[in-house]
Amino acid sequence: MKIIGAVTTHIVQPLIQLMFIVAILIFIWGVVEMVMNASNEEARSKGSKHMMWGLIGLFIMFGVYGILNLLINTLTAGS
């Protein structure tokens, strides 16, 4: 079970962190688009879509993180 811990620590967790960062950046980009284009309805709509997809990405990543922790704790409970 040490292999699972090593793979998780060195591969999976950095990937999850990277995906969190990407989702946060997409959300922030959407906020910037909305603020910078306050007078342009089409650009504001595009910004709100980026914000929505950023939030969806964050929720998905929280779910993945929770499921992975549950699996790891279940598989390594006896070790």
Image: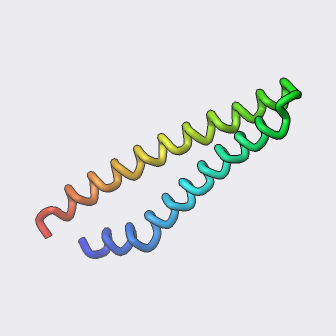
Picture coordinates of residue 53 (x, y %)?
A: 62, 37
Q: Nearer the viewer, residue 30 or 76?
A: 30
**Quadrant assignment, res 71:** bottom left
- Residue at the image position 85 percent from the left and 35 percent from the top: 37
Residue that appears at 44% across and 64% down: 13
Q: In which quadrant of the rendered view does residue 20 lie?
A: bottom right
Question: Which residue is at 62% across, 54% downward?
Answer: 22
Vertically, is 46 above or below 16?
A: above
Q: Quick check: 3 above or below 70?
A: below
Q: Which of the image's four quarters has the C terminus?
A: bottom left
Q: Residue furthest left?
A: 78
Of residues 1 and 69, the one nearer the viewer is 69
Quadrant of the drawing holding the N terminus = bottom left
Instruction: Pick whichever, 69 or 39, lies toward us.
Output: 39
Q: Tell me residue 73's x, y (percent).
A: 22, 58
What percent of the width, then of the height, locates residue 40? 88, 28
User: Residue 71 vs residue 35: left or right?
Assistant: left
Seen at 69% across and 38% down, the residue is: 50
